[in-house]
């Protein structure tokens, strides 16, 4: 099984005993500085693989929840814009080892490279248009504009269709979001040549959550797939990546038998 050294940084960052407020402040700042550098270095390693000329701003969010985001408005990684901001939570940097951290960064880069943010925005726009236009059309039919006779039946039908579209579009958005998560997982594994780091990260996510059955509605409205399903897919991909690596390692021998 995959082993992690998640506790190491946490121990080194922990403070013991009582101290003056100033001492504590400087320690906190030092911790954030160290965390910032860790995240910066991890991003630089992954960015090198993508061929991204790194010029980004790193921010550490002082939260207990593991989170990471790359704010690039969907395209700056591709265009090498300097506006990219990486926001990683303090908990994420403390709890993950280098390999897991690289995997989460590669996953986020995957979202950017595949333009998931732009697709999500487009989907929301379609959802809003598909909801609001029939409702407005329905109201116009019910009220009757420009001397036209009100058509209650048509108006009510249009309004109901708009409401129904709005309700149905929510699980549709969530479905698209889950597809994006699988795609970003795959991107990260292919970029790094292995999915082990992300599998290990997902395992930690699972361990941090209370174990319970989720309802059908929860699964329908979840914006992320269940971690176990993601792990299962990554394990299948891992096999393929290992087979590919084995084939590639054999190639030079056959080409240069001497
Ligand atoms: Zn994601």
Image (tube, rainbow, N blue to C red):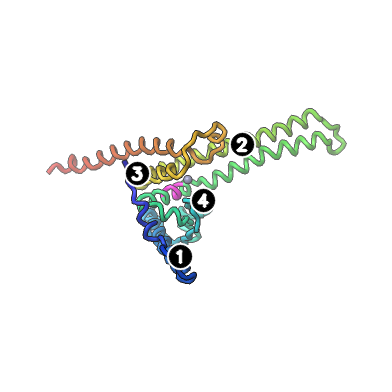
Q: Residue furthest front?
A: 17
The residue under label 4 is 74
Q: Residues within 10 Å of mark 2 (few under 14, many from 20)?
A: some
Q: Which residue corresponds to the image point at 28% horizontal and 37% vertical from the top-left? A: 243
Q: Mark 1 CB in 8 Å range of ligand 1?
A: no
* Residue 163 seen in the figure: yes
Give the magenta-colored segment's residue range.
106-110
Q: In this rendering, would 151 be left or right of 159?
A: right
**Main secondary-structure element of the magenta-colored stretch:** helix
Asked if residue 79 can be seen in this view, the reply is: no
**111 in magenta:** no
Labelled pair 2, 1 in contact (Cβ < 8 Å): no
Q: CA distance from mark 3 to mark 2?
A: 34 Å
Marks 2 and 1, Cα distance to the nearest angstrom?
44 Å
Residue placed under numbered mark 3 in the picture: 196
Give the quadrant of the N terminus: top left
Rounded to the nearest whole Å, what is the CA distance between mark 4 and mark 3?
26 Å
Mark with earlier residue (2, 1) = 1
Q: Secondary structure at mark 2?
A: helix
Say above or below: 14 vs 120.
below
* Mark 4 close to ligand 1, CB under 8 Å: no
What residue is rendered at 53% in x and 35% in y? 219
- Which numbered circle lies on residue 169? 2
> Element under label 4?
loop
Is the residue at mark 3 in contact range of ligand 1, meaning its CB lies under 8 Å from it? no
Q: Is residue 32 above or below residue 101?
A: below
User: Which of disc 3 and disc 1 is earlier in sequence?
Assistant: 1
Closer to the N terminus: mark 4 or mark 1?
1
| Secondary structure state at the residue bearing disc 1 | helix
């Amino acid at each position: 099984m995959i082993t992690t050294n998640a506790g190491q940084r946490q121990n080194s960052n922990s403070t013991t005993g009582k101290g003056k407020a100033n001492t504590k402040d400087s320690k906190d700042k030092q911790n954030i500085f160290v965390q910032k550098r860790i995240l910066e270095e991890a991003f630089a390693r992954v960015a090198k693989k993508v061929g991204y000329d790194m010029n980004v701003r790193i921010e550490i969010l002082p939260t207990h929840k593991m989170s990471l985001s790359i704010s690039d408005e969907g395209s700056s990684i591709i265009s090498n814009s300097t506006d990219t901001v990486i926001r990683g939570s303090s908990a994420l940097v403390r709890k993950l080892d280098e390999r897991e951290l690289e995997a989460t960064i590669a996953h986020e880069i995957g979202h950017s490279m595949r333009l998931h943010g732009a697709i999500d925005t487009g989907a929301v726009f379609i959802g809003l248009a598909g909801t609001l236009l029939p409702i407005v059309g329905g109201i116009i039919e019910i009220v009757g504009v420009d001397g036209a006779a009100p058509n209650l039946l048509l108006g009510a039908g249009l309004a109901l269709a708009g409401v129904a579209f709005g309700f149905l579009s929510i699980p549709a958005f969530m479905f698209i979001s889950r597809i994006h998560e699988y795609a970003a997982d795959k991107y990260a594994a292919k970029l790094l040549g292995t999915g082990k780091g992300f599998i290990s990260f997902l395992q930690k996510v699972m361990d941090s959550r209370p174990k319970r059955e989720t309802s059908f509605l929860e699964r329908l409205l979840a914006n992320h797939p269940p971690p176990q399903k993601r792990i299962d897919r990554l394990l299948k991909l891992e096999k393929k990546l290992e087979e590919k690596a084995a084939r590639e390692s054999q190639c030079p021998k056959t080409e240069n038998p001497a």
